[in-house]
Image: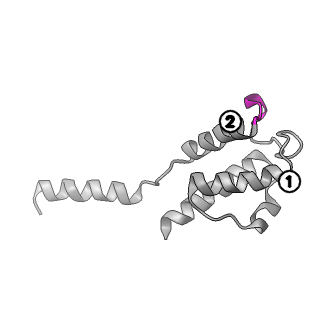
């Protein structure tokens, strides 16, 4: 292999191993749509913030949240997935894990 082929292979490996979305980008996107779509005050969005009590999301908001997640991150949300999600951090962890698992397929 010559240098050009090695350089090309190296670039391909970086593309293969680089996630489609970085965790920080996912969290920023979630933060953004909570503020814009659900009118949550930005300063209330902290890792330990409870989605219902602190951020003020109700059951109808959860339905809208599913639609927003599916359109922004291109994966289907199962209702049972939300049973263990209470805080902003739980929610971000869930989306990040689903986005990362989707990349492996």
Q: Residue furthest bottom?
A: 105
Cα separation between marks 1 and 2: 18 Å
Determine whether, in the image, residue 32 is placed left or right of residue 83: left
Q: In terms of secondary structure, where does tag 1 sit?
A: helix
Q: Considering the image in quadrants, where does the N terminus appear?
A: bottom left
Q: Position of residue 100 (x, y in %)?
A: 55, 60
Q: Residues within 10 Å of mark 2 (few under 14, many from 20)?
A: few
Is residue 22 positioned above or below 17 on the image? above
Kindly identify the residue that appears in the image at 85 percent across and 53 percent down. 59
Q: Is residue 43 magenta?
A: yes
Foreground pick, 34 / 21:
34
Residue 98: horizontal and vertical position, in percent?
A: 61, 61
Q: Relative to 23, is 85 on the left or the right?
A: right
In the figure, residue 55 lies in which quadrant? top right
Residue 93 belongs to the span the image colors magenta? no
Residue pictured at 58% horizontal, 51% vertical: 72
Q: Position of residue 22 (x, y in %)?
A: 51, 47
Relative placement, left or right, of 85 versus 71 is right
**Residue wearing tag 2:** 36
**For numbered disc 2, what is the local secondary structure?**
helix
Q: Residue at x 49, y 63 (%)?
A: 103
Per the image, the residue denoted by label 1 is 59
Crowd rating for badge 1 (residues with CA inside 10 Å; few <14, some 14–19, many 20+): few
Which comes sooner in the sequence, label 1 or label 2? 2
Which of the 4 quarters of the picture holds residue 79? bottom right
Which of the two residues, 2 or 73, is positioned nearer the viewer here? Answer: 73
Count of labels shown?
Answer: 2
Specify start and end residues of the magenta stretch as a single range. 39-44
Residue at coordinates 54% horizontally, 65% vertically from top-left? Answer: 102
């Amino acid at each position: 292999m010559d240098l050009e082929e090695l350089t090309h292979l190296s670039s391909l490996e970086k593309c293969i191993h680089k996630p489609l979305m970085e965790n920080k980008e996912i969290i920023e996107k979630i933060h953004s749509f909570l503020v814009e779509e659900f009118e949550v005050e930005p300063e209330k969005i902290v890792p330990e913030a409870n989605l219902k009590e602190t951020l003020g999301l109700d059951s109808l908001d959860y339905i809208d949240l599913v639609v927003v997640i599916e359109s922004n991150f291109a994966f289907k949300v199962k209702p049972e997935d939300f049973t263990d999600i209470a805080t902003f951090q739980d929610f971000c962890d869930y989306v990040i894990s689903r986005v990362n698992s989707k990349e492996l397929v």
